[in-house]
Amino acid sequence: MEKVLSALGEIKKINDAYEISTDAVIRLEKEMAEAKVCTPIIGRFSSGKSALVNTILGYNRKLLREDITPETAVPAEIVYTDGEDLITVLQNDGTVKTMSVEEYRNFEADANTVKSVRIQLRNSFLEDIPDVMLVDMPGFESGFEVHNKAIDNYLPQSLAYIVAFPADDMIVRSSVGNILKELCLYDMPLCIVITMYDKKNDEFDITFEKMKESLRRFVGDREITYCRTSSFTGEREELEDFLKGIQEKSQDILAANYKKAVYVIIENTENYLKTILNNSQLSESELDEQEEKLGRQMSSLTSNFSKEQKDFELETADCVEEIKADVRSALEAEESTFVTMAMNKQDINERLNSVVRNAVTVSVKKRFIPRMERYSKRVSDTINSESLGDVHVMFSFDSDKVNKGMTSGIVGVVAMILTGSLITGLITGLFLKFRGDKKREEAKQEIRMKLRNEVFPQVLRDVGNGIETTITKQVMLVNTAIEEELSNQKDILDKAMADVRNKMKDEKEKKENLAIDIHNDLERIGEIKDGLR
């Protein structure tokens, strides 16, 4: 991280010397100065996550409430400060509210209106891990979809993960297994914490080994750190060691996260200097010709990028239909399960939610992300193959960051759609309508027809529209980033050409001034001579 910051400092000095904008450098320096290794703690609702954080913090009085309901659980970001303790509550509408630690102990958040809480503490253990941000996440599988969306929102910025399993329930369910699969797509440290270790039974060692075997089905041979904690006995040393290990690696983890952005800034400055150097010896007419050439090349580059955009728009439309088809297949495959649940008067909303989320997640990764990667590569090749003057325009694409953001963004939108009153009402009607004495098979057939003719089509319409809107928005964000980068590099090259022309003008003025000075000096010499006659 020191090397990256040092490089930014050097580039800033060079940019200042040539009056190149340093806005991008200043923004990145500020972001890096505040950067932390985001480490969410996730798990099922009531898996002991809040108690785990309270144990790590070591306060006599608990900071995080452990008796919360799903409606009051929101992400809590916990970081070290060398100043006064401060709690900041961020609302969904962008407003913030500050409070003391004592006030926060009695605070009940509304998960529908509160986005997150930022907890800055002058704490002895947090002082040992100043570059790590712990995030106590809302539990999933709570039947409250806002929580799942919160987890989706944190995936793009997370650089390490802790997954909590209570000692009395170490079953690896498909919900956590699917999250682990996704985490394994990215190179980040992973820790499995057994909470409430004091509640272990005599079969713990056997159950623990079975859990490890189950986890391998989702994570393969990936290295995992296992820790045991107990808020009752205060056992926490293994987890503290894991977090201290993250702190030791934090500078490397953060540096890897910022290097690409720094390279883009360096290349912009390098292009400026090359343009100045390569064009400084040109005559005015040659400089005119070079500027015309640069304009033609930029126009060609913009045209090629526009063509790639239009081609990808057609691919995106096809991709949305393929994702919808995958969701339809997943729903149809679970039809018998839905029918059985409805016959038993069970609410199928959570099951349907899980089926659709998993289907969308898998399909987006299988169908959309590869297309997005191919598109970005084509754009990169198109841009990087062009030369503007004597320098190459560069475009850097952080595929991991974009892919994480796109997947979580699309799934998050789908999750919110599935909580809609219309779909929930349709599902509720499945078992409310058939409480009479109809024959079982007739009831099954009616439920099946309602699923096929009402529930599934409504889900596919709403989810399909949400997917299309979100994919279009995500692609637009990528294209806007590309356009901004092209514009930045063009501005840099335009400035270089203008500076070359100003230098030529300055030299011309110097020559003209020198000639005037010489002429004046000659006249003065003549006057001196006349005075001597």
Image (tube, grey):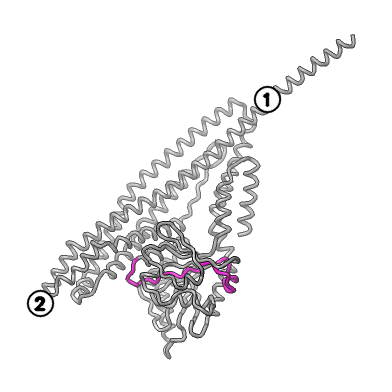
**Image side of residue 243 versus residue 168, left or right:** right
Residue hosting label 1: 509
- Decide: is 53 above or below 376: below
Which one is in front, 34 or 63?
63
Q: Is residue 426 visible?
A: yes
**Image side of residue 410 versus residue 325, left or right:** right
Region of the chain picked out in magenta, as a range: 119-145
Name the element at disc 1.
helix
- Decide: is 368 above or below 449: above
The x, y position of residue 10, in whole percent, is: 65, 50
Cα distance between the residues tagged 2 and 1: 102 Å
Residue at 31% in and 53% down: 468
- Decide: is 124 above or below 150: below
The x, y position of residue 197, in whole percent, is: 46, 84
Name the element at disc 2.
loop
Q: If the image is split into quadrants, where does the C terminus sit?
A: top right
- Rendering quarter of residue 311: top left
Q: Residue 437 — which label?
A: 2
> Which residue is outermost to the right?
532
Q: Is residue 133 visible?
A: no
- Rendering quarter of residue 123: bottom right
